[in-house]
Each structure stands twice: as C-alpha cells, then as structure tokens.
C-alpha cells in the first residue's frame, strides 16, 4: 500500500497530466491536460495498463531497491 506509481506527461517542461496509482486515473494540470486526461480516463484498457504498471514495475523491483539501500 505504501508504493505509489506516478506517470507524468510534460510538454515544454510543464507537467500537463499525471497518472497516480493511488488516485487510479489521470489528472490534468493545464486546460489541455484536463481535456487529455478526460480522453485517457475514458479508455478503460489504457487505465488498466497504467494500473498494472504498479505491480509489474514497482512491486517487482522493490526488493532490489531495498537491497541496494
């Protein structure tokens, strides 16, 4: 539960949208980002793929990260 997956989208060094595994959907931070987040959130397969990244990437590598620390 303490592990969080964040996927951020940037344009011109400005974050316009972000997927947060704790929220479970995309959140927009600019006008264009809000519109894009709505489009991505309607695509259930894309949201499911982002949610799966927490298990595939974060949980898979957490043991390696703790050993290195």
Image: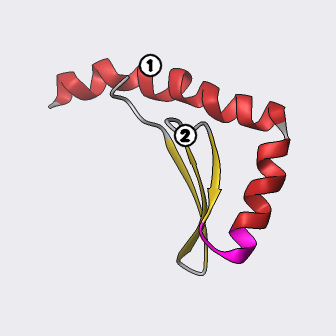
Q: Quadrant of the C terminus?
A: top left
Task: Please give left or right for residue 41 compared with residue 20 in the image.
Answer: right
Residue 4 found in image quarter: top left
Looking at the image, tell me whether mark 1 or mark 2 is earlier in sequence order: 2
- Nearer to us in this view, 44 or 7: 44
The part of the chain drawn in magenta is 29-33
Say which residue appears at 52% left-offset and 21% top-offset: 55
Say which residue appears at 58% left-offset and 30% top-offset: 53
Q: Quadrant of the N terminus?
A: top left
Circle 2: is it few (<14), some (14-19), or many (20+) Cα within 10 Å?
few
In this picture the colour scheme is secondary structure
Circle 1: is it few (<14), some (14-19), or many (20+) Cα within 10 Å?
few
Label at residue 23: 2
Task: Please give left or right for residue 29 compared with residue 45 in the image.
Answer: left
Secondary structure of the residue carrying tag 2 is: loop
- Nearer to us in this view, 49 or 44: 44
- Chief SS of the magenta region: helix
Secondary structure of the residue carrying tag 1 is: helix
Q: Nearer the viewer, mark 1 or mark 2?
A: 2
Rendered location of residue 50, percent (x, y): 65, 35
Residue 31 lies in the magenta-colored region? yes
Rendered location of residue 8, percent (x, y): 55, 56
Say which residue appears at 62% left-offset and 30% top-offset: 51
- Nearer to us in this view, 43 or 12: 43
Which residue carries the number 1 mark? 60
């Amino acid at each position: 539960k303490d592990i969080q997956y964040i996927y951020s989208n940037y344009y011109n060094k400005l974050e316009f949208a972000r997927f947060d595994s704790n929220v479970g959907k995309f959140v927009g931070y600019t006008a264009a980002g809000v519109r894009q987040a709505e489009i991505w959130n309607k695509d259930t397969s894309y949201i499911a793929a982002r949610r799966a990244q927490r298990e595939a990437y974060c949980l898979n590598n957490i043991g390696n990260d703790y050993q290195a620390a």
